[in-house]
Image (spheres, rainbow, N blue to C red):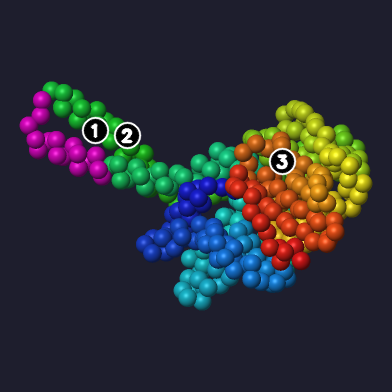
Amino acid sequence: MVNTLSHLGIGLLLAYALGLKGRKRLVLLFLSSLPDLDYFTYSIFTLISSSLSHEVRNQLFYLLGHRELTHSIFFAFLVSLFIWVKTKDRRFTFGGFQAVFLHILLDYTTSAKMRPFYPFNTHESALRAIYPFDPIVNFLPLLPLFMMAGGYAINRNKWIIKSKVNLSVDRWSIKERDTLSRKLNSLTRLHGFVNRNERKLYASIILVLLLWTAVFPVAKIFLINYISDTEGTRVSYKNTYPISIGKFLAVYPYTDTHYKLLEVSYWSGIKKSFYVEKISVTGDVPDAQAYAERAGKLYRASVPQTIDYPTYSVSEENGLVTVILSDARNPYVDKWPYFDTVYRFVFDRESREYEAYESHYGRPEKKLNKNYFE
C-alpha cells in the first residue's frame, strides 16, 4: 500500500512524460488516485449491507469494497475505454490506463490484498514483495510535486527580492537579499534543467519504478525457495509478509497442532522462529475441536478474507461456548492493519444459535449480522 501523495506523483510523472498539459494533466492526476475512491463506495456498502442476503452481500462487496473492483485490471481497461470513446486520443488513453494500472501494480506488490483479475477470477492475493514504506516507491514519484513546489518558491522569492529592492534597506537586509538570491539562482538552475529535460527525466523515473517493482518480486522467489528448501516444506509466497525493508514474516503449518512462524531476510536467511498453537482451550470443553471447526466454516463463507492462518481460542461458561478466531501472525506484527482482525463467536449449546463480533484497527468490538456468514 503506497501513500496517496506518491500515487498523485505518478499521475504527474505520466503526464509530463507523455507531454500532456492543461486539463488532460489534471485528469491523469485524478486517475492516479481514482482506485482509492472506493473508500466512499465501501462506506455506502457498510450502510446497506445489513439488509441484504448473504449471497447478495458478498457479490456487492466485490463491486463496492475497498481494494476490490477499482483495484482490478478490468477496471483499468474500463477507464481507458471510456477515455478513448470520449476523446479518441491515443496518448491520453494510454496515459489514463497507465495511471490506474500503476496504482494497482504498486499496491499489489506491497501489502494490499486485492482481486486483480475480477470479475473473471475472485481469488484474492498480493505479491507482498516490497515493504509498504519502501523509499523508492514512496518518495521517487514525489519529484514532480517537489518541482511544482520549487516553481512556486522561485516565483514567490523573486517577488520578495523585488519588494526589498524597492524599499530603503540597511546592511543586514542587503546581506539577507544576497543570500536569498544565491539560493534562488541554484534552485532556478535546477528547475530549468528539469524543465528542459522533463519528458526524458520523468520517463526514466517511471522506468526505474517499473524495474523496482519487477526485481523485488523475483528476488522474493529466490528467498522463499531457499526458506522452503531449508525447512523441507513449501512456504507460501503470497502470505510471506514484508515487515521492514528486505525482511519478511513467513508462516507454514508445522504439525497438525502448530504453525511455525519465521522471520527471514535477504541477508541473513532465517533469523528467528516461533511456534503458535492452532487451537488453545481454556477449561474443560470436550468438543472444542468441533466448535473451532464450526467457527472456521462460518468465517470462510464471509468476505473479505483477512485471516490466512487461523488460530482458535475456545472457552465455555454457563452453556455458552466462546471461540476467538485470529491470525497466527497477529501477536508478531505490531501496529499493522493486516493481521489484527479478531472474530469472537459465542455459541449457545442448547439452542445452537450464535452471535458473532469483530474488532480490528484498534477499534471497539462490533456485532456482525448473520448475513455476514450465511
The disc placed on residue 186 is 2
Q: Which stretch appears magenta?
A: 155-170
Could you tell me if residue 352 is visible in this image?
Answer: yes
Examine the residues drawn in magenta and state their main secondary structure: helix
Spot occupied by residue 343 in the image (x, y as percentages of width and height): 72, 51
Residue 372: say if magenta.
Answer: no
2 or 3: tag closer to the N-terminus: 2
Could you tell me if residue 310 is visible in this image?
Answer: no
Q: CA distance from mark 1 to mark 2?
A: 9 Å
Q: Circle 3 — which element? A: helix
Q: Which quarter of the figure is the C terminus placed in?
A: bottom right
Identify the residue shown where x is 22% and y is 41%. Answer: 158
| 253 left or right of 370 in image | right
Q: CA distance from mark 2 to mark 3?
A: 50 Å
Q: Circle 2 — which element? A: helix
- As displayed, is residue 220 above or below residue 41? above
Residue type indicated by callout 3: Asn
Spot occupied by residue 332 in the image (x, y as percentages of width and height): 71, 35
The disc placed on residue 181 is 1
Identify the residue shown where x is 55% and y is 62%. Answer: 43
| 279 left or right of 121 in image | right
The disc placed on residue 330 is 3
1 or 3: tag closer to the N-terminus: 1
1 or 2: tag closer to the N-terminus: 1
Residue type indicated by callout 1: Ser
Q: Residues within 10 Å of mark 3 (few under 14, many from 20)?
A: many
